[in-house]
Image: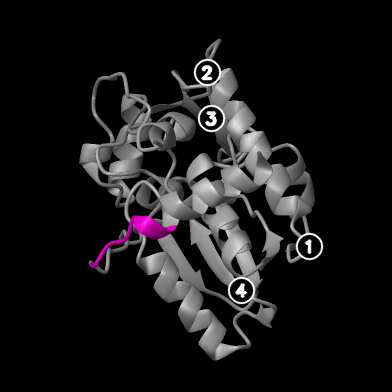
Amino acid sequence: MVAAVVALAVVLVVSLVRDDDGGSSPAPAAGGPPVELTDWLATELPSGGTVTAEPDVRAALVQAGVDPTVLPESGSRGDAGTPALALTTTQPEGSRLLARFAGDGSADPLLLVDPAPVEPTADQLERRQTLAAAVLANPTTRVEGNARSVLETADVDARLLALVAGLTAQDGVGLWAFPPLPGEEPGAAPARRVVVDSVGGQPVPADGAATQRLVAWLDAQLPPFAPDVVEVTGDGVLIAFDYVPGPDAVVAAVTP
């Protein structure tokens, strides 16, 4: 069963390829609200994602350079693939707390919440657990930092987990860490970011050829498995996805 699930992940991830180069979001202007918040809003929302906020907070964010279209004046309900988040000082019941951003000392912290998170079904969660267990059981897998604990709980975005499983089955992989962004609450939502520091037993980024092969493979993926960020760093290759409320449902929609 484990081998079958890993094989399915490889088929899904490797067979969906693209031929465009993608793009990146511009950095927000400095000043005003916490830079961690403006960075998050500029880089972590997929196209169509929105965040509602009180008028004074919205005005400050727009002044800081956040795209006004990301900050509608009234809320709307998102879906599994398009978040409709909110900035508040009190977490609403039933919401998912994604990140906490400190105030200026005279104000309460701003909480970034998903008012309507899409939880995985029992079958989707079992699939994620089986796939994560298969990655850890593979003798070619090497884990450091928080990578083992994150995989043991299968607390990984289904899109990212499919990529990791595909790499594991093809070449073997070393996982340096699943790093959260500044302000994010660890464990609040499945991990969307991982740093790969080896593939096929070759160190990344020290081995240039291995690094180029990894980046090319990642750049070839089609949605929903196409990462929103592929960045070569001193620690390895960062692979990251934008936040969506229900990544398991997004993957299930393209799973045979």
| Mark 3 or 1, nearer chain start | 3
Between 191 and 94, the one lying in front of the other is 191
Amino acid type at mark 2: Ser
In space, the residues marked 1 and 4 are separated at their CA atoms by 20 Å
| Location of residue 227 with respect to 251 vertically, above or below | below
| Mark 4 or 3, nearer chain start | 3
According to the image, label 4 marks what residue? 236
Q: Are marks 2 and 1 in contact (CB under 8 Å)?
A: no
Position in image of residue 182 (x %, y %): 59, 50
Q: Kindly report which numbered mark, 4 or 2, lies closer to the viewer in this rendering.
A: 4
Amino acid type at mark 4: Gly
Q: Kindly report which numbered mark, 4 or 3, lies closer to the viewer in this rendering.
A: 4
In space, the residues marked 3 and 1 are separated at their CA atoms by 41 Å
According to the image, label 2 marks what residue? 95
In space, the residues marked 4 and 2 are separated at their CA atoms by 34 Å
Mark 1: secondary structure:
loop
In space, the residues marked 2 and 3 are separated at their CA atoms by 11 Å
Residue in the picture at 32% in, 24% down: 78
The magenta span reads 14-19
Amino acid type at mark 3: Leu
According to the image, label 3 marks what residue? 111
Q: Kindly report which numbered mark, 3 or 1, lies closer to the viewer in this rendering.
A: 1
Amino acid type at mark 1: Pro
Residue 93 shown left or right of residue 135 in the figure: left
